[in-house]
Image (cartoon, helix red, strand yellow):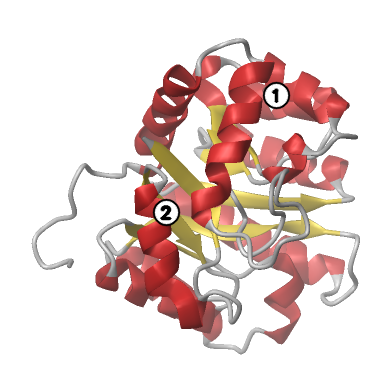
Amino acid sequence: MLIDTHAHLDEDQIAPILADVVQRASQAGVTSIVTVGTTADSSARCVELSHAYEAVFAAVGIQPNYCGQASATDWDSIVRLASGGQAVALGETGLDRHWDFTAFDVQQDYFERHLRLSHQLDLPFIVHMRDCDEDVLAMLEQARRRNPLRGVMHSFTGSIDTARRCLELGLHISFAGMVTYRKSEMLREIARAIPDDRILIETDSPYLSPHPHRGQRPNEPALIVHTAACLAEVRRVDLATFSQQTSENARKLFRIPDSKPDGID
């Protein structure tokens, strides 16, 4: 049993072959996939996919690099999708100083909206963080002073200090294919230190294919087994134990049911 907590199944690289991708994931032991929105339109497609596939669950949000393109009504669409009981999480949200597609104050505004909506709807949030650890932590710590936090640091590549501070805020840490790369020893050391009940795994497909498929496009949920095997070895547990633990963590955080409610195919 494996759960891919972060994929982008609506991306052009995957959408035309999605039925095969979902089937291969099932054959690899992946029981659930959280497909994550990056824009209002992407989020709506993610919800549609969650209706079409038993194993797929939707997260809705506006990724920081797309906030500058958002129309006046796009946030209303996210609120509507999130409020309809069709999403298991908000995001991805967060901050990004690596790219300059969106003014930083606009990113901060949308990150704050996601954090407040998370508390309002009691949905976890998914954080994108690139080259801005202190900025993200400052906003998370401010939000924590208002309310308890439920969320995950997606595709984590930060420092051990950043990981420690995120854990102190009550957040989960998720690792993607990069943790399997030969030069990622420091990241594997961080992964070794994450408490059993706070670690998650993901593919971030169609990106970040794990070793031995590094460079393969598209990455897909079936390949999460390689990330799971790497981390199980790093943490000195067998693969079945690690898979069960991370799946249990994902089910608790995202409240993923064993089966979907009536009316969702």
Q: Is residue 259 above or below residue 264?
A: above
**Farthest-out residue, top:** 236
Q: Is residue 135 left or right of residue 35?
A: right
Mark 2 closeness class: few <14, some 14–19, many ≥20 residues within 10 Å: many
The amino acid type, in three-letter code, at marker 2 is Ala
The amino acid type, in three-letter code, at marker 1 is Ala
The label nearer to you, 2 versus 1, is 2
Q: Residue 211 in the image: state x and y as whole percent.
A: 73, 43
Q: Nearer the viewer, residue 35 or 164?
A: 35
Q: Residue 135 in the image: state x and y as whole percent.
A: 84, 47
Q: Residue 236 in the image: state x and y as whole percent.
A: 61, 10
Q: Is residue 52 above or below residue 24?
A: below
Query: Is any atom of residue 168 visible in this view?
Result: yes
Q: Residue 12 in the image: state x and y as whole percent.
A: 59, 82
Question: Helix, strand, or loop for circle 2?
Answer: helix
Q: Is residue 193 above or below residue 228?
A: above
Q: Is residue 71 left or right of residue 17?
A: right
Q: Which residue is mark 2?
A: 25
- The CA span between labels 2 and 1 is 24 Å
Asked if the residues shown at circle 2 and circle 1 are in contact, with their CB atoms under 8 angstroms apart, the answer is: no
Occupied quadrant, residue 63? bottom right
Give residue 191's mark. 1
Q: Is residue 42 left or right of residue 194?
A: left
Mark with earlier residue (2, 1): 2
Residue under the point 68% across and 18% down: 234
